[in-house]
Amino acid sequence: MMKWLASNGNGKALMQAISKLHWHKNRLEEIQPIGEKNGYKRTIIVDERGVPLSIDIAPANRHDVTRLEVALQNRIVKPSCQTMPLNLCADAGYVGQLAENTIIDSGYIPHVRPRGEEKMEIKRNPNFKPRRWIVEVAHSWFNRFRKLLVRYEKTDRSFIALHQLAATIIALRKIGVIYG
């Protein structure tokens, strides 16, 4: 088989592709792609204007609730005063007692709603302020960085660093709009 690969015109490219397969392994957490999702999942916490406050990158085969505590602990900007209650709006992936306890223990008031329930509330109450779309818009801003949309990085450190750089650029753009 190896003689055929060496003599074939595409053998060199195929051998390089096979040898590079070992570089894509995640050294921090092994991802088993057999019957599960492979890739990554981005968990972000944003403020009410969409400025990223916390980013967590994890394998896609992990549940959202398992990464919630890490994202809440890695928050860059801590609240300055506790006069107003802190609200945390999340989607249906965070439904359950474990997620609710984690949110409450971190000092937030949980607002966990599926998308359809939020639409019904908007129809019933005209003064209702939808909050979850801000997080979806923030994910869209991250996806505008083409280097993040498809993972080309071999190491986790460089991939996380690119996400942090993108979050910094997004924050500077938002501050420029607010104070510019």
Image: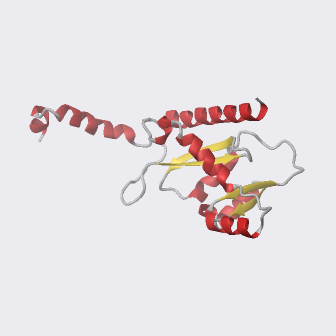
- When asked about the image quadrant of residue 17, the answer is top left
Image quadrant in which the N terminus is located: top left
- Horizontal and vertical percent for residue 26? 44, 43
Seen in the picture, residue 5 relative to 126 is either above or below; the reply is above
Q: Nearer the viewer, residue 145 or 60?
A: 145
Percent x, y of residue 67 = 60, 53
Relative depth, front residue between 33 and 117: 117
Picture layout, residue 166 above or below residue 45: above
Q: Determine which quarter of the picture holds residue 68.
A: bottom right
State the colouring used for the structure image. Answer: secondary structure
Q: Position of residue 93 (x, y in %)?
A: 59, 62
Horizontal side of residue 57 vs 2, given as left or right: right
Residue in the image at 62% along x and 67% along y: 116
Where residue 79 sits: x, y (%)?
81, 44
Determine the residue positioned at 22% across, 37% down: 14
Q: Quadrant of the C terminus?
A: top right
Q: Does residue 70 appear anywhere in the picture?
A: no
Q: Residue furthest right?
A: 83
Q: Is residue 157 left or right of residue 121?
A: left
Answer left or right for 153 relative to 172: left
Residue at 76% across / 35% down in the picture? Answer: 178
State whether residue 134 appears in this view: yes
User: Left of 165 or right of it: where is 24?
Assistant: left
